[in-house]
Image: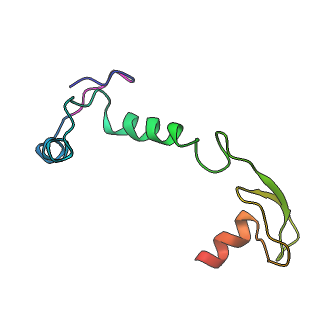
Amino acid sequence: MVCRDCGNEFTWTAGEQEFYKQKGFDNKPSRCPDCRKKKKFEKAGGGFGGGDRQSFEITCSQCGAKDTVPFQPREGRDVLCRNCFSKTRS
């Protein structure tokens, strides 16, 4: 099949066909898996801080750096910048 967005050829696997059948989807995919993911990402707001999401400026409780977060911080709660948050997740 040929993707309508990028023009690259892609294979609609038997597993994907079975999935479409189980979900009751009538139409074959018109986008390759990469373009489907990209379209879904864009539709969801483009990721962290994208789309219609509101961003809130914060000062990191750990290092003091300025950053933005996609939620409104609560008073009395520590908020971390992306770097410090990533370090705590590792």
Q: Is residue 11 left or right of residue 77?
A: left
Q: What span is in magenta? A: 6-10
Name the residue nearer the viewer: 73 or 14: 73
Rendered residue at 18%/44% (across/down): 16
Q: Is residue 12 left or right of residue 77?
A: left
Relative vertical location of residue 5 with respect to residue 73 in this rendering, above or below: above
Q: Which x, y percent locates residue 43?
A: 51, 37
Looking at this rendering, what residue extends furthest in the front direction? Answer: 24
Name the residue nearer the viewer: 2 or 70: 70
Image quadrant containing the N terminus: top left
Q: Quadrant of residue 14?
A: top left
Number of marks in the rendered image = 0
Q: Is residue 31 left or right of residue 59?
A: left
Does the magenta portion include 81?
Answer: no
Relative vertical location of residue 5 with respect to residue 85 in this rendering, above or below: above
* Colour scheme of the picture: rainbow
Relative vertical location of residue 28 with respect to residue 23 in this rendering, above or below: above
**Secondary structure mainly formed by the magenta segment:** loop
Rendered residue at 64%/70% (across/down): 86
